[in-house]
């Protein structure tokens, strides 16, 4: 299960927020009592919360030249720290709700299981309304699979993902963007009493998304990835 889509999209939504500055105190001589840089640092958000839902579809290759098609549904909550206006550090926890893995012997159903992620994202470039982000995340998910007539088996997936996003802010309200990511990581599974390992057959994603500002510090987003590992996600973020 690949959960790092959440981290990159939430970082885009949060780092795209713009916040109005409040005036500093001014003395009778007209000299400001604080610098603009100091005041912006004090008033900008330093923390954020997000919630997302995700659907993924990918093809896996297991040891023994075995191939299977996997689909998963998941929900994730993210807590983020913004140490600078351009940097987002985040941690996420959630649950893989449902899904299936189709193999020649039949379809394995996924039981709900925990997922976790850590991410670091950097707004590396800004020129007027245009911006670019570099994204990174490490994620893990755990579940049990079940095939009719067989006992449940353990299933664990780990993923390291690096990517980039380029977008534009329109009317201080919308942020459409395009994305590219590369990733890799193992799957450890016990199939019919035997331990097997696997990985994705496609180690990339190409897609696009749209973030919409909600008030001064909120965003909602939707993202679609039709090429490589396919995914569809949506969620909301709030900075404070």
Image (cartoon, rainbow, N blue to C red):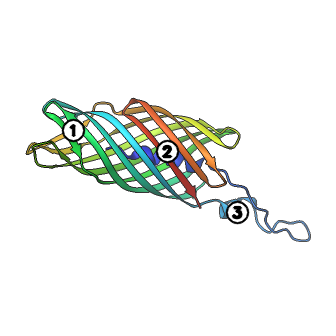
Q: Residue 36 versus residue 177: which sits nearer the camera?
A: 177
Q: Is residue 213 left or right of residue 79?
A: right
Relative to residue 13, is residue 31 drawn left or right? Answer: right
Q: Residues within 10 Å of mark 1 (few under 14, many from 20)?
A: many
Calculate the distance from the C-alpha at mark 1 to the C-alpha at mark 2. Answer: 26 Å
Quadrant of the drawing holding the C terminus: bottom right
- Residue at the spot of label 2: 9
Q: To which residue does mark 3 refer?
A: 38
Rendering quarter of residue 63: top left
Does the residue at mark 2 contact the one at mark 3 (Cβ under 8 Å)? no
Contact check, label 1 and label 2, Cβ < 8 Å? no
Residue 34 is drawn in which quadrant? bottom right
Q: Secondary structure at mark 2?
A: helix
Residue at 29% x, 47% y: name it: 158
x and y percent of residue 120 in the render? 46, 51
**Residue sitting at 36 percent across and 33 percent down?**
229
> Which residue extends farthest left?
193
Q: Earlier in the sequence, mark 3 or mark 1?
A: 3
- Tell me residue 155's x, y (percent): 21, 47
Query: Does residue 220 lie above or below 39 as drawn?
Result: above
Residue found farthest to the front = 148
Q: How far apart are the two marked residues, 2 and 3, measured between alpha carbons?
A: 29 Å
Q: Which secondary structure lies at badge 1?
A: strand
Measuring from the top left, give residue 73's x and y in whole percent.
35, 44
Query: Which one is in front in this view, the residue at disc 3 or the one at disc 1?
Result: 1
Camera-side residue: 96 or 14?
96
90 and 27: which is toward the camera: 90
């Amino acid at each position: 299960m690949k959960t790092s889509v959440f981290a990159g999209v939430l970082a885009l939504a949060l780092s795209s927020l713009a916040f109005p500055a409040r005036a500093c105190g001014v003395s009778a001589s007209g000299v400001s009592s604080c610098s603009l840089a100091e005041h912006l640092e004090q008033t900008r958000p330093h923390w954020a919360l997000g919630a997302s839902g995700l659907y993924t579809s990918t093809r896996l290759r297991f040891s023994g030249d075995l191939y299977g098609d996997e689909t998963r549904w998941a929900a994730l909550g993210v807590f983020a720290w913004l140490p600078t206006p351009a940097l987002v550090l985040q941690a996420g926890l959630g649950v893989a709700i449902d899904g299936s893995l189709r193999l020649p012997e039949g379809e394995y159903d996924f039981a709900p299981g925990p997922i976790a992620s850590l991410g670091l994202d950097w707004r590396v470039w800004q020129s007027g309304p245009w911006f670019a982000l570099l994204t990174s995340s490490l994620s893990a998910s755990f579940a049990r699979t079940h095939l009719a007539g067989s006992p449940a088996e353990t299933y664990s997936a780990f993923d390291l993902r690096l990517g980039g996003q380029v977008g534009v802010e329109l009317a201080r309200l919308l942020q459409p963007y395009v994305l590219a990511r590369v990733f890799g990581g193992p799957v450890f599974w016990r199939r019919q009493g035997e331990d097997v390992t696997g990985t994705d057959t496609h180690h990339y994603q190409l897609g696009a998304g749209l973030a919409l500002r909600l008030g001064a510090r909120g965003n909602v987003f939707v993202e679609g990835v039709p090429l490589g590992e396919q995914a569809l996600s949506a969620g909301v973020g709030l900075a404070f």
